[in-house]
Image (tube, grey):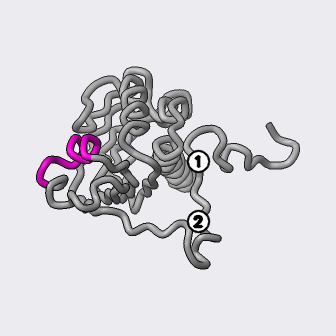
Amino acid sequence: MEHDSAVQGLLDRQQIEDKLKLYCRAIDRLDVELLRSIYWPEGTDDHGSFVGNAHEFADFIMVDLRKRVIDGMHAIMHSVIDVQGQFATAESYYWAYQLCPGGVEAVTEFFGARYAAQHADRIDGPHDFFCGGRYIDLFEQRDGEWKVLRRKITNEWNTVRPTDRITDQGAIAHYNLPGMRGPDDWVYANRVPGKG
């Protein structure tokens, strides 16, 4: 029995970690349905710019990301997960990069007037936004499935700068193969042969 309990604990943690990683895919690929699937319908998200129902957050953040971000990547660094019956707490460290559009209005609105003034000579080009923090989650298991019931995000640090990204010069141009935002990304076509 103790062995079975330990195995179930590992399976529970794995399912929770999978949800945390799918959150990153949903945000970076702008997949609103996948993002909703991470949370229970009455789940909540406190994201700083949004506090409320998590399914409403999914709609809100998709609009915000389309406006403020050209492309980006989120990654879960590590998670501390404590499963207690049908509930589990998780503290997950994240790292994120986003390429943001230039222009006085967009840069000032997102990064503030001081940053815009400091980089007036390069304000029209895109800007790199790096940040890191934690997702602090309460998960609940229902009918064998774990989803987020409550999320609080922290943003511990950030760095912003005019981009120096090279995409069209030298040999690196051949390796510049960014993913797409939406259902045309390769991950959605990457299926096991003979399966959906």
Q: Quadrant of residue 99?
A: bottom left
Q: Position of residue 87 (x, y in %)?
A: 38, 37
Residue marked by disc 1: 180
Q: Residue furthest right?
A: 194
Q: Is residue 5 visible?
A: no
Instruction: Let me know if residue 110 is in the magenta part.
Output: yes
Q: Secondary structure at mark 1?
A: loop
**Residue type at numbered disc 1:** Met
Q: Is residue 34 left or right of residue 57?
A: right
- Residue drawn 25% across the image and 29% down it: 51
- Left or right of 187? Residue 13 is left
Q: Residue at x 47, y 50 (%)?
A: 71
Range covered by the magenta-colored residues = 104-114
**Residue 108 picture location, percent across and down:** 20, 45
In this view, the residue in front, 70 or 15, is 70
Q: Which residue is mark 2?
A: 176
Q: CA distance from mark 2 to mark 1?
A: 12 Å
Q: How many marks?
A: 2
Q: Which mark is residue 70?
A: none
Q: Which x, y percent locates residue 64?
A: 36, 34
Residue 111 vertical placement versus 75 (above, below): above
From the top left corner, tell me how far across and down residue 191 is, in percent. Answer: 76, 47
- Front residue (pair 162, 24): 162
Label 1: few (<14), some or many (≥20) within 10 Å?
some
Q: Residue furthest bottom?
A: 171
Instruction: Examine the image and state in which quarter residue 40 appears.
Output: top left
Question: SS of the residue at dot 2?
Answer: loop
